[in-house]
Image (spheres, grey):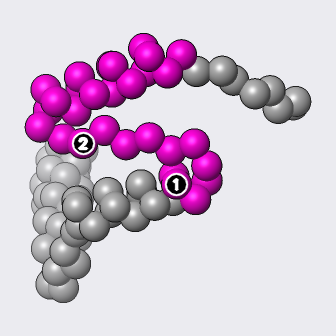
Amino acid sequence: MARRRCEIDERRVSLSNAQVAQLSGGTAYRATTLQQLADVYATLQQQIGFDTIKGDASTGWLRLAALAVSLAALAALLINRRLPA
């Protein structure tokens, strides 16, 4: 796979990015080097951010297990016409 330099129509790209940013209430970013791109991603990560919340994650697994047991009991009733002993 060969690399080719891709020329960008700055006028069209700048206008569309600026318009999208203005309509969405955001900011348009432009990066022409890898370092500028890394800086843009760092800025976005700071703006968006996330919170890590520690908590009990077993609730979903317990519900899945209860559903599996219920389906197994229902299948046993339908197949054998009685509950397993």
Q: Is residue 72 left or right of residue 63?
A: right
Q: CA distance from mark 2 to mark 1?
A: 15 Å
Q: Find residue 41 and report its image quarter.
A: bottom left
**Of callouts 2 and 1, the N-terminal one:** 2
The number of callouts visible is 2
Camera-side residue: 50 or 60?
A: 50
Label 2, residues with CA under 10 Å away: few <14, some 14-19, many ≥20: few
Q: At 22% from the left edge and 78% from the top edge, which residue is drawn?
A: 52
Q: Which residue is mark 2?
A: 27
Q: Is residue 84 visible?
A: no
Label 1, residues with CA under 10 Å away: few <14, some 14-19, many ≥20: few
Q: Quadrant of the C terminus?
A: bottom left
Q: Is residue 70 above or below residue 61?
A: above
Q: At 19% from the left edge and 74% from the top edge, which residue is drawn?
A: 51
Residue at the outermost right position? 2
> How far from the left and from the top, in percent, is residue 60?
18, 67
> How far from the left and from the top, in percent, is residue 79?
24, 44
Mark 2 residue type: Thr
Mark 1 residue type: Gln
Q: Is residue 1 left or right of residue 24?
A: right
Q: Is residue 37 left or right of residue 50?
A: right
Q: At 16% from the left edge and 58% from the top edge, which residue is drawn?
A: 67
Q: Which residue is mark 1?
A: 36
Region of the chain picked out in magenta, as a range: 9-37
Residue 75 falls within the magenta-colored stretch: no
